[in-house]
Structure formats: structure tokens, C-alpha cells
Amino acid sequence: MESRPLRYFVAVAQELNFARAAERLGIASPPLSRAIRKLEAELGVTLFERTTHSVALTPAGEVLLTEARIALDALDAAGRRARRAADPEPKLVLAVKADADAGLLDPILAGYAADPASRPVSLRLCGWGEHTRLLREGHADAALLYEPFDHTGLDAETVTTERRVAALPAAHPLARRDSLSLADVTSGPPGEVDRFVDEVAARHRVRDLPQLLKLVELGDLVTLLPESVPARYPRPGIAYRPVPDAPPAVLAVAWPQQSRSAATAALVRAATSLRGA
Amino acid sequence: MESRPLRYFVAVAQELNFARAAERLGIASPPLSRAIRKLEAELGVTLFERTTHSVALTPAGEVLLTEARIALDALDAAGRRARRAADPEPKLVLAVKADADAGLLDPILAGYAADPASRPVSLRLCGWGEHTRLLREGHADAALLYEPFDHTGLDAETVTTERRVAALPAAHPLARRDSLSLADVTSGPPGEVDRFVDEVAARHRVRDLPQLLKLVELGDLVTLLPESVPARYPRPGIAYRPVPDAPPAVLAVAWPQQSRSAATAALVRAATSLRGA
DNA sequence: CCGGTTGTTACCCTGAGGGTATTACCGTCG
DNA sequence: CGACGGTAATACCCTCAGGGTAACAACCGG
């Protein structure tokens, strides 16, 4: 199993169109077509159901797609990690999303810096749901992120858990109450509700928290956020109300499974040692 | 990052000798030497410290070795899993080591067969410590095995925990006692002691439990085993004695992280549902 | 039924990567 | 200390995997 044909396969599986896939790969479509046929012959499996006007994945193709993505990620990660390992003064790259740290980033970094095994830290700012990709592709050594996330290939420890608050338009009828229940928030209009911020973000194509809060202000949705948010993002147009029975927000530190380097371990120690506080 | 140069790199890193590695790869050594140099150039990193009479991995080489193994495993696994996914009547391959099942294999299979999501099961017998390789390389869908094992890339659930018994030569002074403590067993000669059977197995190049028990009979070592062993392997020359304060033996079911197929899930259900019994 | 779109086949050609012969280097041992 | 054995690297050649272009075949929508 070589990597190039697999890369070609993934491109076709994503585009479901040989011509477009070939263009994306920077080659002509005949060699692409041949490469896929050869791959199918090698595996003894048909990967695509093709007519002249449609390309569809077979069940075997479906599983190869997910498996191939994993393998190709691992391949790229291998190169990147080796490159980074050669750095004479290696840095520890920590992936964080702005303000998605429960206010703990500074104390974690301070605690980490005090550890003898620590290295200079380089922060890698990222958007919703990018943390795991950065870890898997070898761009980052560790990440600070909220559950839930895809744990595949990663190890993680809980840093802290926070209660949830609902963010509502100030004029919303529920905003008159001091405290809400999950049922209040999740039942019906007005305003769409999602328990997990990243789902909302994906649906509304929002890239950061201020944008999301703007949508709340406009009355387009109601969201549950960690209780550390209101202090950082006070908004006249938004009412934050505790939701005691909502599942808590879990902040975790995650890292690639096989990377048990001393530096990563020290960071994990620093992050989890704040748990008691 | 292509896969072939990485495979070449792994061969050299294992042999630490270009000529032997080339032979193993079925190519001549000059192209191998060139491939490695090209890989180093591509990464911008030197992977080997070489003189004409010695080859050694640099730190960057070390990390590339472990990363490359993971990536190449994933690559092979992708192919194998796709092939298996095309099977018209797909089987579920379960990796087990003979008798390393706490006697639960039959009930698990029975419970599994009753599940509507179940598939025909094909058992893949394997030796000490092979389970995880079979899972990672796509030869098996699930494994029944004792902790501790390398969880990298795997998910696992505990099936059962067993108390430990020490296996001693019948003539051993400690055999006169009804029960032992961990301190009794681990302190000093006669007889080497290891808490984990697979370490012992690796050290003594033993492939199965009967061979291991033979070593115990001969007085070469003392080992802690799960309490389900004595009933299956009664030996006149061996005394089994409970060790209440030894850490218990944990039998687990494991499967590749990303494979959340209905059939695998059903097997996990069947295995873990026996936990209460 | 026709024209456009898309995957495939036929054919050619280049260069990545394999082979052989040779060199340069180093450690070892008479 | 010099000759030898072993090893990686270089020089040079050559083959074929894999890329390109042109033509074709199949299918769909109008």
C-alpha cells in the first residue's frame, strides 16, 4: 500500500468527480483514473460505483476513505514531528482557541514554566474544532479545549469543569428569571438552541465567540456557555443566566497518544494540578 | 511525505546498517542510501549519524522511527480493512490468546450471537502481546486481552477483574503457606519474579502458558497469574497460592479507536454485560 | 435525437528510482 | 604502522511507473 494512490483516492472520494479531483491534484484525469483502477486491482475491491455521469463510493470505499484519512494524517504528522524534533531549542506548541480556556491559560503557563522539564511555549491560536486536527497532523504538541471532541488518536485529562450559563437576548422573556433549567432553554422557539457551542458554530458558520454573541443579541439563537464567559464578554444586549441542571462544561488538555515526552507530561501536570483550586 | 522512503527509513533504523537493510528490502544499497539522503533533504533534518563503520539514529530520527511505524501501520491497516469491508458476508475477527480469557470466551460469544447486530465470529489465535498489533494492522476487529497493554490507537473496556495467585514450585518454602502477600513474592530469590506475565514471556522467550508453567516447575521463576488459571492448568509440580494484596488481573476487550461499527459495538456490549455476573 | 459532459482507452514520453562498478573512509589486526 | 575487510557514498547507466495528449464511449438533459 503506497501513499500516493491513497491520496488520489481521497481526492476522488471527496470530489466524487475524476476531472475536478485531477485538477485539485495537479495532474490530468487519465492517470488519475488509471491510478484508482490499479488501487482497486491491488486491493481486489471496487471502491467507486461509476457511470459516466456519477461517481459514488461503495461500502468498501467508505471505510477506505476514513482509514486513509487517518493514515495520511499520521504520515504527514510523522514528517512534521521529526522536523520539529530537530529544533535545537525545541518549543512546546500549545493549541488554544482565544478565550476558550476558562481563564486558566495564564496560571497553567506560569505553573508549567516553573517545571524543570518545561520548554518555551509557543501558542497556536485556532478556531472551533481545529485543535484536534492540529494535534493529529503534528502542528501542535498539546491543546486546551472543551469537551466534547473527537478523542481518536489522542489522550486527554480534565483540567476543570464549569457550570453552564445560558446566553439570551436581554429582551427574551426568560431573561426576567434569575435561574433557568435545561428544559426552559431547550424547549421550543423563539431562538434555536444547542447544547454544544461547536455545533452552533458549524451550523451558523461562526468563527469566534463575539460573532456568536452577536447572533444571540439579534435573537437568532440561545446557547449554553461556560460560566467563565460572562465576565470576559459583558454585553448590554445579552443576559447570562445560570442553568444549574445543564451538563457542565469540561475543559481538557489533550495530546497525541504516542507522544509521552517529558515536556508534554509537564504541561499536563501543570494543567491538572489546578484542578483542586 | 511518501510512504516508500519512510519504509526504507524504518528498515535502516532497525538494522542500523544500510547493506543489511537494503537486502531486507530487496534492493541494492546505493538506491537506499540515496533515498535516505533525499528524505533527509526533504525534511531538512539529519536522521542518521553515520561513519563508514557505524550508523546511529539522531534524536530526530528516533521520533521519526516511532511516528513512521504508526503511520505505516495505519496505511497497511487501511488497505486490509477496506478489503475486509468488501466481504459479502463480513465476519468479526476476534483476537484471543488461548486460555487468556478468564473462561469468559464462551459466554461472551453466546451473548454476542444473540445480538441482532452480530456477525459470524472468526477467532484469531495469537501469542503474548500480539493482540494490539493485530488490531492496529487491521487483521482483527476486536481483542480479548489482559492489561497492561499499549492503548495507543485503541479503545478498551474492562470485562472483568480477577484476583491474583502466585505460581510456585511445589517444593518452594512459601508453598507451605495458604496465602501470600505481594512482598513475599517480590522479595528476592530464589526464583525471579515478575508481576506481568508478558514481561516474563518476553524475557524467557516463552510462547504459551504451559511453557511458562514448566519454567515455574523447574524453579526458574515465580509468577503472578489470574485466579482462573489453576483450574485450567492443574500441575502436580506447581502450587498456586492466593496473593490478596497483588493488583488484580484486568481482562479487557479492545478495538481500534475509529471503528465504531455496529458489530464491534455489539461484541463490546456482550463482553461488558458479563461484568455484573 | 443531439450535444455536452465525464470517465476510459490508446499511445507516447520523461524522470524517479533501481542496478553495477568504483571510490573514500575507517577500524582492526598482524 | 600499513594492509585489509567492511561499509557508506558517488558516478553512471537503464528501465518502467506514472505523467501528458488525443481520441473515444457512454450517458443524461433538453
Image: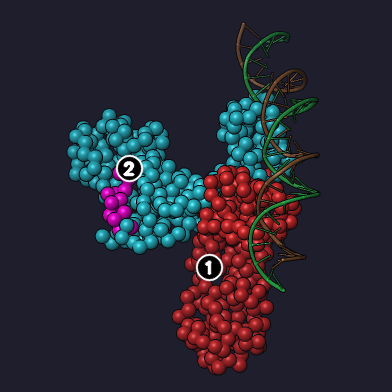
Chain colours: A red, B cyan, C brown, D green
Vertical side of B221 occupied by A58: above or below:
below
The chain identifier of the residue carrying mark 1 reads A
Quadrant in which residue A203 is drawn: bottom right
Q: Identify the secondary structure beneath mark 1.
A: loop
The chain identifier of the residue carrying mark 2 reads B
Q: Which residue is mark 2?
A: B98
Q: From which residue to which does the magenta span run?
A: B97-112
**Residue B231 seen in the current view:** yes
Q: What amino acid type should be assigned to the residue bearing mark 1?
A: Glu
Quadrant in which residue B183 is drawn: top left
Crowding at mark 2 (Cα within 10 Å: few <14, some 14-19, many 20+): some
Q: Position of residue A105 (x, y in %)?
A: 61, 66
* Nearer-the-camera pick, A20 or A106: A20
Residue at x-position 67% and y-position 78%: A211
Q: Position of residue A161 (x, y in %)?
A: 50, 71
Q: Which residue is mark 1?
A: A147
